[in-house]
Image: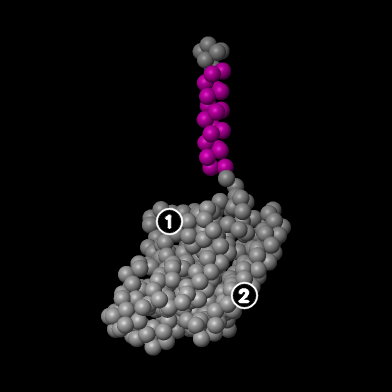
């Protein structure tokens, strides 16, 4: 072989080896998050020091979400899988157990909170209400589990995870205060929040709203005509001016309630769309947890303060 050709082939092989290496040489922890609410917290603490995949995008209902084969593969190759837990991702339970058996670390954020802080519901027997993130002071407690799991998986960056976690706790504290203060703008007797499903139990308890969801804690249970009529009767009786849709639940249910209230002679209106179980698009204010909390309280306050038409 001519020396020139030999040199060329050697160089080619070297280039190819380097390319291969680059494609797989991501030694950052591989992390999967289920909902984009969980994903936002993990991204905030992990930053660019983790390789993060978030399975559910904006508008996706976690109660109904079924993992694809690709999701399952991602999870089995991950170092850590973060999920909300308490059956929020009700159709992924078996998958989390499988991952646990395969040695993938699984962390259910809501399940790291003390049981004494959790709510139960008659329509969700045997379980805790999973929607803890809608109270920022509870979501703050979930930061610890993310910080700890990332630091254990990647000790060389432990200090930076701790630093980001501390800064984020301050931000959540500030968000909590903002929501509290805004809520106070609504007279107490007008603080009634009607939404598509019962996602706002912790929110109501933390910020002083009476809450009613058309569907129960899980959207897996559909609302019937009787539920629609009962809720319409409640709206008319209490003269609640606005109802709210949710970005991850089809609007037809809450729209049926609005029509039923109008049929009873009360001019109920839409107050806007809230982000209950999913954040908005990335790159918009509602695409982050803190932006979503601010959007929700601003929408609720503006709606409830509207003069009845
Ligand atoms: Zn929900």
23 drawn magenta: yes
Can you give x and y, in whole percent of width and height, for residue 282 in the image? 50, 54
Disc 2 element:
helix
Do residues under tags 1 and 2 come within 8 Å of each other at their CB atoms? no
- Along the line of sight, the residue nearer the viewer: 293 or 265: 265
Q: How many marks?
A: 2
Circle 2 crowding by C-alpha within 10 Å: few under 14, some 14–19, many from 20: few
- The residue at 55%/82% (across/down) is 187
Q: Which residues are magenta?
A: 7-25
Q: CA distance from mark 1 to mark 2?
A: 40 Å
54 drawn magenta: no
- Along the line of sight, the residue nearer the viewer: 126 or 218: 218
Can you give x and y, in whole percent of width and height, for residue 217 in the image? 42, 77
Residue situated furthest top in the rendering: 2
Circle 1 crowding by C-alpha within 10 Å: few under 14, some 14–19, many from 20: some
Can you give x and y, in whole percent of width and height, for residue 226 in the image? 29, 83
Q: Is residue 293 left or right of residue 60?
A: right
Q: Is residue 138 left or right of residue 227?
A: right
Q: Is residue 32 visible?
A: no
Location of the C terminus (image quadrant): bottom left
- The residue at 58%/64% (across/down) is 290
Q: Is residue 18 above or below residue 202?
A: above
Residue position for label 1: 71
Q: Which mark is residue 181?
A: 2
Question: Quick check: is the Cβ at mark 2 less than 8 Å away from ligand 1?
Answer: no
Disc 1 element:
helix
Which comes before the other along the chain, label 1 or label 2? Answer: 1
């Amino acid at each position: 072989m001519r020396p020139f050709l030999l040199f060329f082939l050697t160089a080619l092989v070297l280039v190819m080896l380097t390319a291969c290496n680059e494609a797989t040489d991501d030694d950052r922890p591989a992390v999967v998050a289920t909902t984009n609410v969980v994903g936002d917290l993990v991204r905030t603490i992990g930053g660019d020091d983790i390789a993060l995949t978030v399975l559910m995008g904006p508008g996706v209902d976690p109660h109904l979400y079924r993992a694809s084969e690709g999701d399952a593969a991602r999870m089995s190759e991950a170092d850590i899988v973060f999920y909300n837990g308490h059956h929020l991702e009700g159709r992924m339970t078996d998958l989390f157990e499988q991952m646990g058996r395969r040695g993938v670390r699984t962390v259910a954020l809501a399940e790291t909170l003390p049981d004494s802080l959790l709510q139960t519901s008659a329509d969700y027997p045997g379980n805790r209400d999973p929607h803890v993130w809608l109270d920022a002071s509870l979501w703050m407690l979930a930061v610890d589990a993310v910080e700890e799991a990332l630091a254990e998986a990647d000790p060389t960056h432990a200090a930076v995870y701790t630093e980001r976690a501390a800064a984020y706790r301050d931000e959540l504290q500030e968000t909590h205060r903002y929501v509290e203060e805004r809520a106070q703008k609504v007279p107490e007797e007008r603080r009634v929040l009607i939404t598509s499903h019962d996602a706002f139990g912790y929110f109501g308890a933390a910020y002083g709203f009476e809450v009613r969801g058309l569907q129960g804690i899980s959207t897996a249970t559909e609302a019937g005509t009787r539920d629609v009529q009962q809720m319409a009767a409640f709206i008319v009786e209490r003269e609640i001016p606005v109802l709210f849709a949710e970005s991850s639940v089809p609007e037809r249910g809450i729209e049926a309630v609005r029509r039923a209230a109008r049929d009873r002679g009360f001019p109920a209106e839409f107050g806007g769309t809230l982000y209950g179980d999913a954040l908005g698009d990335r790159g918009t204010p509602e695409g982050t947890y803190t932006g979503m909390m601010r959007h929700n309280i601003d929408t609720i306050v503006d709606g409830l303060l509207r003069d009845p038409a």
